[in-house]
Amino acid sequence: MAQASRIFVSNRALGYVSNEVPCITRYIKSRNEHVVVTCIGKALHTYGMEHLVLLAVSDRTQDDITCLVADNSVIFTAAGKLIQAWKRGVQIVQTYEGHLHPVYLLLPFGGHLVSVDESGEVRVWDRRSEEVFLTLNFDEKTFKISAIAHPSTYLNKVLFGSDQGRMQLWNLKTSKLIYTFDGWDAPITVLEQAPALDVMAVGLTDGRIILHNLKYDETVLTFTQDWGAVTSISFRTDGEPIMATGSTVGHVVLWNLEERKVASQILEAHNGVVSRVKCLSKEKLMVTSSPDNSMKVWIFDQSDLGGRLWKFREGHAGPPTCARFYGPRGNVILSSGSDSSLRVFNTVTESSNYSMGRAAYSRKRLKKKKENFESVLMPPVVDFVSEVAREKEWDNVAALHLGLPVVTTWSFDRRKMGDHRLLPERWANITKATLNVTATSVAMTNCGNFVLIGYSSGHVDRFNIQSGIHRCEYGAPKAHKNAVRGLIVDPLNQIVITGCSGGLIKFWNFRPAFGTSVCPKPLNRLVLEEGVTFFRAHKENSLVCVGGEDFALRLVDVEMRNVVRTLTGHTGPITDATFSPNARWVISASMDSTICVWDLPTASLIDRFQVMLPCISLSMSPTGQYLATVHVNNLGIYLWSNRTLFAHVPLRPILPDDIIKMDLPTSTGTEAVITIEGDIPEDVDEEFKSADQIEDLITLSGLPMSRWHNLLDLDTIKRRNRPKEPLSESRAAPFFLPTLPTLEFKFDFGANKVLDDGVAALRLDRLMNYTVFGKLLEETVKTEDFSQVIEKLKSMSPSAIDSEINSMGLEARGSEVLMLQFMKAMNHLLSSNRNFELAQSYLALFLKVHGLSVAGNRALHGYLRDTLSETQKKSWERLQDDIMYCTCVVDTLNL
């Protein structure tokens, strides 16, 4: 499927942490840190233990992952009939194929891998060659494998547990059954090696935990938990004799093995089955995961050997029902879930995600462990509104609950549920069983002071959100005869617009009649052809988007009080709609699994794409960067990037049947995508070495700025550093040794060579008074190889470079050749795309010193004009284009 439509491109999914597959922990020696690997369906998440930062997200598998195990170097997963090995938790490096039925158990076993499928077939794989080493078949009626483990120090031995309650010890090298344990007449769920040799912990479905000595076939200890089957077992190895067990109701029990009793309990550690309990090796930490989409780290620092919650990552335990961007920056999403919770997600870093709590009839009763947890919880939040104006002073979020007439208030600043339960006095004394009224729509004023609520009975009421006091009622005796499904207040608190399921829209004065708390009559009415399903408004214009039961959208002008646009094209009920920040687009979602983008000035469809599952809620960020969507039966919130912000997109109208099918976005490691290296040397790649030069890219020299940045200012620096007092004359030296005229201090031992007849010889090379650098330039006339010249310049100090360039004057014989060769060297340097800043600095100094001389010499001026200037222009334009592109991308991402 496509990854992008005309306007939107898949970005990433938020809110996924863990599912029913137990998590695993690994110690990464190179990071000196434990990491936790969780499964989110078809991909793996890797979190760093120190801050629970999402380090990496794996590639996606074809089927959902059903089993997850690991050793020191590799992670193994089973997805359907396929077994795959992952390197660093992100990349598939090996695939084991051959099972005819889905695999549900895996065990790394040295250089081998043991797998069990649903037909009872056990295969032992050679990990390197991916070939089957051994195959065993078990009859499901007599021995259905339910757990597998390798007893420590038992060479080539594997222990199988079964649903029949028995255990079998096999030697995989000889493929022989060594011993059969009678069992305990209950299905085995967990096998875990105890710190003591020969002792295996066995978890049963009836809640018993058996510590059994395999060597003597004797039970050492027996514990029983009262919360159902044992789901996981782990032992502390930091010196305390503690065993931790998980249960199906979310509790964790800590057993004292020395005293043979319960040491402590962690009640309601999770809201579902505790799929994994893992105590970290030689540390006072324990990791738990659960299908409630959470992973928690507990620390043992209590005097009663109990654990307290240290860090956690979690998302919605049930599918989200509504999602809205919060605030003007566009980096915060407020969402409600079917688990009765309200959560905050950050689009920049998931480490900033948090929960505002779960809706409860009484927060005090919710905190009491003796109360029935489910009886205190309120139904899920199906819709909510929020304003940032008064978030520091009082509650600023109002939420509707499924099937309830009560509207709850929440505080974004305090991150919790408020104290107000908004309900009109007319229903205050009616019991919940007899009151057949529900809140169906809610709106909040821009000032953040008032909440307006519409009910299924047709009533519309206004409350003060700070005090929770009822302030006004619209309509006498009620606003509509049918259920109120749409409710909007204009930005200036002048007009209230209501719509009902009968297709009638009414416009009301915001303030009640003088001296009363009732606004009896509407200012105007507007009759639609079909019933209203929802209202959506834009704060900066007078348009209201009205969803209709006929699968159409209508734009109503609040000032003119009539329909100005009708948008048709959906083939199913419209679930939600939102305006773009500039109010030019309306984006709508429908149960036909399509998302449409409508251009309001032309009333045309400009984009349409279809996803696998219908979207039930969507919201556009205030900056226009993201579109957030929520889909049926999915725990995540999906982000789509707006392509028009960073690319030219033609927005011509499209045909209604022009539909692009797209996959939902996947999770990505947005916080710190770090390579997770293993501990085994064979699993570590060689260190990456960047190429010396990449084609069509500019490469800098890497030299300090002091070596080239101040070349044009050396005269100023010398004048500034000139001594204030005159230098004292030095004492005359007793003798003098002749030296060579170079920048490098060398004695000339052959300066006064005398011939046999006593006449001093005249050396012609003295007439060519070239420095070492000048001689290198002179040699390039024949070789055209400027590599030694460039290396010599890079090794020289700024003062030496200045002196060398100044010595190329035309007053010396043959210096025209040196100047031409120097210009050729700079042309070579610019053409190679290397040492770009050095070439610019050297050439600038050369033209500053010899600009007039070059201009007056036909050969030098011609080379500068025809060759060197063109090379300089091309190299700079190439660099300028890259800089402007990077600047545009960064500015777009900062929106």
Image (cartoon, rainbow, N blue to C red):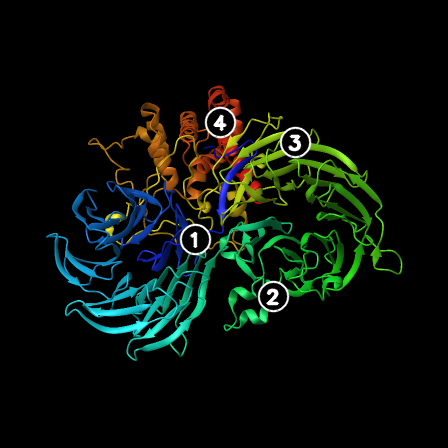
- Spatial separation of the CA atoms under disc 3 and disc 1: 42 Å
Locate residue 547: give its quadrant.
top right
Q: Which residue is labeled 4 in the image?
A: 874
Residue type at mark 1: give it. Leu
Res. 361 mark: 2
Give the crowd class for mark 2: few <14, some 14-19, many >=20 residues within 10 Å. some
Query: Upstream in the sequence, badge 1 or badge 4?
Result: 1
Query: Upstream in the sequence, badge 2 or badge 3?
Result: 2
Q: Cβ–Cβ below 8 Å for labels 1 and 4?
A: no
Estimate the x, y position of residue 220 in percent, counting from the top left.
22, 74
Give the mark toward the camera: 4 or 2.
2
Locate residue 517: give its quadrant.
bottom right
Task: Kindly state the secondary structure of the residue where label 2 is placed.
Answer: loop
Task: Kindly state the secondary structure of the residue where label 4 is placed.
Answer: helix
Q: Residue at x 73, y 42 (%)?
A: 502
Residue type at mark 3: give it. Thr
Determine if residue 806 is in view.
no
Q: Cβ–Cβ below 8 Å for labels 2 and 1?
A: no
Give the crowd class for mark 3: few <14, some 14-19, many >=20 residues within 10 Å. some
Towards the viewer: 322 or 772: 322
Residue 205 vs 783, above or below: the answer is below
Determine if residue 553 is in view.
yes
Task: Kindly state the secondary structure of the residue where label 3 is placed.
Answer: strand
- Spatial separation of the CA atoms under disc 2 and disc 1: 35 Å
* Quarter of the figure that contains the N terminus: top left
Estimate the x, y position of residue 277 in percent, counting from the top left.
35, 63
Residue 862 vs 397, above or below: the answer is above
Q: Residue at x 19, y 53 (%)?
A: 110
- Spatial separation of the CA atoms under disc 4 and disc 2: 71 Å
